Every structure is written in C-alpha cells, then in structure tokens.
C-alpha cells in the first residue's frame, strides 16, 4: 500500500481530524500548535504554541474543541474552557457521540518517565449543557477514544496497559461491561491513537511497532499497515468518501530530516464521520 507524505516538519503530530470539505486539522503535541491543511495542500497555524493537544473535534457552531492543559472550544481566536481538573497533566484524545457530547481522557501519570509510578486518569463526559460527569477511572495513560458504528461500544486506549478498554454504552452515555482487548498485538511497543471503520473494526497506531494495526471489535489482530516511523502516534479516516486514512507520526525513517509526518493512504475500507461537538 502506498503511503503519501502530505505534511512534515513537526515534533509529534497528533489529533488528525477532517471536516466535510476534506480539510485536515492536526496538532503538534510537543512542538505546540493546532494546524489546518487545506485540500490544496496549504498549511496554516490556527493556535500557536499550545502543547499536548492530543485530540480535536469540530464544533457545530464553528471552530473546534481541543485538549491540552484543559479542554476548550476555539472559534475565530476566542477560547472557551469546557473542562479543567486539578492534578491533570493534560487531557489527551477525545471523541464525540451522536448527540454531540464529548468524551475525553485525562492523563495524571508522568509522560517524561513512563517507568514512574502510575497515577490513573479518568474518562469524562462533557454534556450538552456544559456539565461534566466522570464515567470511570483506572486509565494509566489515556490515548485514543472511539465508538462502534452503532454507538453502543466505547473504546479507550490505555497505552501502558498495552491494550484497549471496551465498554457497553447506552443512549444516556452510561457505560458498563468493561473489558480489556487487543493486548497480544502490542507486546512490543504500545497502542496510541485509534479510529473505527464502518465495519466496526479498530485501527490503532502502534508506537514501537512501526505500523497501524487493524483489530476486530474483540481485539483480534486482522491486518496491519507498515509505516516508516518508530513512533506512529494516531490515525483517522477522512476524505470525500471517508476512504482516506491519515496516519501521523513523531519521526520519518525514510527521511529523518522531515521529523513528524502526516501520511495518507487508501486502506480499502471507509470510516464513520465524527459527529460535531454541540457542547
């Protein structure tokens, strides 16, 4: 499969998300900033210097919701804080449900020393009225979040547990039946960002694995896409037919001068559009 590099020169690319026109939003978690790449290939900076932005979601009123030291709605340069919590080093990946509520993971453990004692983080739901509910804890290093196509399963990557927590979720956003899946695929390295295709299979970025791995809804490895990077950090579907896959990294083994790179490919399956945030 051909991987086309479409942007590069960053420290650690995260949070890929496309809009209805096919423009790509992404972040540089270590270098700082939120960026926009148009379908014509022009890249512009939307938010300067903000670090540790691991997740983005477009908002129905315009702009986008971003993570980092807090969760905030950015629109035309104005920032509205939606969630802050003491003791959180950063909020990482996030996702929206069909109603436009936001699900976001918090990292309390140190990212500078992954061997240090773990301080488990939580998953929060930001409701349409702006209220916040803590759904569950016990996530050592929170990463990718996604939903099954029918919206009835919530997936949440816990990197240092080397797997993904799956939960049943009802229409009110309540979770149950937590189980840990996919560990066998990540014996070397750790899972990072993820997305779900229209068939319900999971695609997870594999840091240390130099690939994006395809998993069944129960966590069995089905396939993989080789990526020329040691740190493959996230993955998302996009494009007019949701058949493009955007793979982002913190390095580029084909050309180490490029650094963090965004690759695009066509894996032969389609994704599910991410609902707009409505908080």
Image (cartoon, helix red, strand yellow):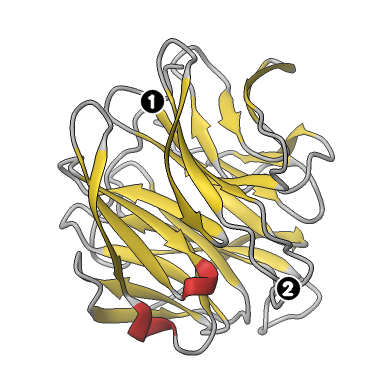
Residue 116's label in the rendered image is 2
In this rendering, position of residue 216 left or right of residue 74: left
Q: Judge whether residue 247 can be spotted in this image.
A: no
Say which label, 2 or 1, has the lower sequence index: 1
Residue at the image position 18 percent from the left and 35 percent from the top: 170
Count of numbered circles on the image: 2
Judged by depth in the image, the label closer to the viewer, 2 or 1, is 2
Residue 60, horizontal then vertical, whole percent: 43, 17
Q: Name the residue under label 1.
A: 101
Is residue 151 visible in the rendered image? The answer is yes
On the image, the x and y values in percent for residue 3 come to: 48, 72
Q: In this view, does 60 lie to the left or right of 68?
A: left
Residue 164 image point, x, y percent: 37, 65
The answer to whether 32 appears left or right of 166 in the picture is right
Location of the N terminus (image quadrant): bottom left
Up-down relation of residue 171 to residue 181 (above or below)? above
Give the secondary structure at mark 1: loop
């Amino acid at each position: 499969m051909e991987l086309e590099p479409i942007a590069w020169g960053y420290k650690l690319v995260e949070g890929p998300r496309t809009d209805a026109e096919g423009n790509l939003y992404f972040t540089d978690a270590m270098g700082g900033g939120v960026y926009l790449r148009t379908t014509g290939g022009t890249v512009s900076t939307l938010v300067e210097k903000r670090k540790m932005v691991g997740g983005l979601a477009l908002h129905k009123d315009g702009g986008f919701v971003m993570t980092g030291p807090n969760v905030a709605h950015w629109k035309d340069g104005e920032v509205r804080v939606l969630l802050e919590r003491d003791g959180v080093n950063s909020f990482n990946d996030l996702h929206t449900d069909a109603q436009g509520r936001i699900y976001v993971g918090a990292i309390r453990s140190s990212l500078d020393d992954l061997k240090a004692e773990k301080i488990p983080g939580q998953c929060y739901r930001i409701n349409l009225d702006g209220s916040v509910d803590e759904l569950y804890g016990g996530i050592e290093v929170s990463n990718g979040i996604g939903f099954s196509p029918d919206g009835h399963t919530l997936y949440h990557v816990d990197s240092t547990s080397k797997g993904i927590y799956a939960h049943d979720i009802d229409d009110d956003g309540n979770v149950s039946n937590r189980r840990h899946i996919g560990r066998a695929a990540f014996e070397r390295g750790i899972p990072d960002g993820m997305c779900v295709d229209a068939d319900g299979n999971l695609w997870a970025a594999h840091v240390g694995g130099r690939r994006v791995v395809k998993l069944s809804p129960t966590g069995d490895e089905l396939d993989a896409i080789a990526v020329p990077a040691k740190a493959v950090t996230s993955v998302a579907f996009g494009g007019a037919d949701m058949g493009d896959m955007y793979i982002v990294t913190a390095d580029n083994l084909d050309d180490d001068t490029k650094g963090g790179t965004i690759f695009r490919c066509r894996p032969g399956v389609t994704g599910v559009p991410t609902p707009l945030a409505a908080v």
